[in-house]
């Protein structure tokens, strides 16, 4: 790692499930472990406008920079360097995959929420998804009706991106997109936002839909192993999260259309079989434009062809298992 792991991350990586300790930290903060990879921090006092903040990282075990960012925050809360003014739940998603430096062991954890883990009972990640759903539910159930419920699921991507830092806003059904959250994303340094157009089995969709949390998947750069992250590239999200938990966020300018480009998911590239072929360079970046008429992918008789010239590719990954999404075709959007 670029810094020494705190006692929090050491505890997670040891995967010691026999004891669930409660730690007394500086400034009257209490840390309570609900599972070997889920810890809740309680501030010393009550806040007149409380927020219940869930931060998750390591949902994909090889996406290490967000783990380091959140672990450093926990270390500073523990020492009293960073004040904690709100309830905070931190989930280190997939510790076994983190230990092995793998994206996942049996099945992509971020495709197993919203109850989808019940269809993959033999996957190690199924139990992990069920636990995270349970802990998120327990946490948000304690929030009073006037409290702000927030969930930021921090990731890095397999490949580079035209927009290095971007957010995925889960499908909201009949709820409106929140302008305060859109302004906060700009404050974080987010360069583009994907407005999802249908339900998904991701962690952020689950908390958004089940508990009406303001939830986002945040893609913050490229996935690299522990020890190979330039954490200065994550300064925006690090500062914004520290301000959030310490209640020191400055007044933010209202969100304005054009603050950053918006995209909408148009359709998924589904890998139906091992015959699936993706006709993109292996190093193609997220948000690369797709020329009109370009054959994006084919799977037997099914062909995915770009239409109009404004579409872009997101998360291309032909190596997924059959039945899973091998990419998303997105298009420009407005609110």
Image (tube, rainbow, N blue to C red):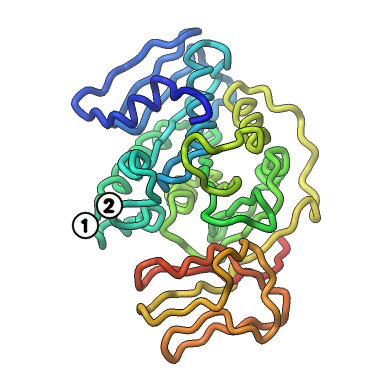
Q: Spot the residue most to the top.
A: 27
- In the rendered view, would you say 115 is above or below 87? below
Q: Are marks 1 and 2 in contact (CB under 8 Å)?
A: yes
Question: x, y percentage for residue 317?
Answer: 48, 66
> At 67% from the left edge and 67% from the top edge, which residue is drawn?
288
Q: Is residue 305 visible?
A: yes
Is residue 147 or residue 78 the one in the foreground?
78
- In the rendered view, would you say 282 is above or below 302? above
The CA span between labels 1 and 2 is 6 Å
> At 51% from the left edge and 44% from the top edge, which residue is drawn?
224
Crowding at label 2, few (<14), some or many (≥20) Cα neighbours within 10 Å? many
Which residue has dot 2 on it?
126
On the image, which quarter does residue 160 sit in?
A: bottom right
Question: x, y percentage for residue 302?
Answer: 46, 88
Which residue has dot 1 on it?
121
> At 65% from the left edge and 43% from the top edge, which residue is drawn?
181
Question: x, y percentage for residue 196?
Answer: 57, 62
Q: Which mark is residue 187?
A: none
On the image, which quarter does residue 323 sit in?
A: bottom left
Crowding at label 1, few (<14), some or many (≥20) Cα neighbours within 10 Å? few
- In the rendered view, would you say 308 is above or below 248? below
Question: x, y percentage for residue 73?
Answer: 53, 24
State which quarter of the image contains the C terminus: bottom right
């Amino acid at each position: 790692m670029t810094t020494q792991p705190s006692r929090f991350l050491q505890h997670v990586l040891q995967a010691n499930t026999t004891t669930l300790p409660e730690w007394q930290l500086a400034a009257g903060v209490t840390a309570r472990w609900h599972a070997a990879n889920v810890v809740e921090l309680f501030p010393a006092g009550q806040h007149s406008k409380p927020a219940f903040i869930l931060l998750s990282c390591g949902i994909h075990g090889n996406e290490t920079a967000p783990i380091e960012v959140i672990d450093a925050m926990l270390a500073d809360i523990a020492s009293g360097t960073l004040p904690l003014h709100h309830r905070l739940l931190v989930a280190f998603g997939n510790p076994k995959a983190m230990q092995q430096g793998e994206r996942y062991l049996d099945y992509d954890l971020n495709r197993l929420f919203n109850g989808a883990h019940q269809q993959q009972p033999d996957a190690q990640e199924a139990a992990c998804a069920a636990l995270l759903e349970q802990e998120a539910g327990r946490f948000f159930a304690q929030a009073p009706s006037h409290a702000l419920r927030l969930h930021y699921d921090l990731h890095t991507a397999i490949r580079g991106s035209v927009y290095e830092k971007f957010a995925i806003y889960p499908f909201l059904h009949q709820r409106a997109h929140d302008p305060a959250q859109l302004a906060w994303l700009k404050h974080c340094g987010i360069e583009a936002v994907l407005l999802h157009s249908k339900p998904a089995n991701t962690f952020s969709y689950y908390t958004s839909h089940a508990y009406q949390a303001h939830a986002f998947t945040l893609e913050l750069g490229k996935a690299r192993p522990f020890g190979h992250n330039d954490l200065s590239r994550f300064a925006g999200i690090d500062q914004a999260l520290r301000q959030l938990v310490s209640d020191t966020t400055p007044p933010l300018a209202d969100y304005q259309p054009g603050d950053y480009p918006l995209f909408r998911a148009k359709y998924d590239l589904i890998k139906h079989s091992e015959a699936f072929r993706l006709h993109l360079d292996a190093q193609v970046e997220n948000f690369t434009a797709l020329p009109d008429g370009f054959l994006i992918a084919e799977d037997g008789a099914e062909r995915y062809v770009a239409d109009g010239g404004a579409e872009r590719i997101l998360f291309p990954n032909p190596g997924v298992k059959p039945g899973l999404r091998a990419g998303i075709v997105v298009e420009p959007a407005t609110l």
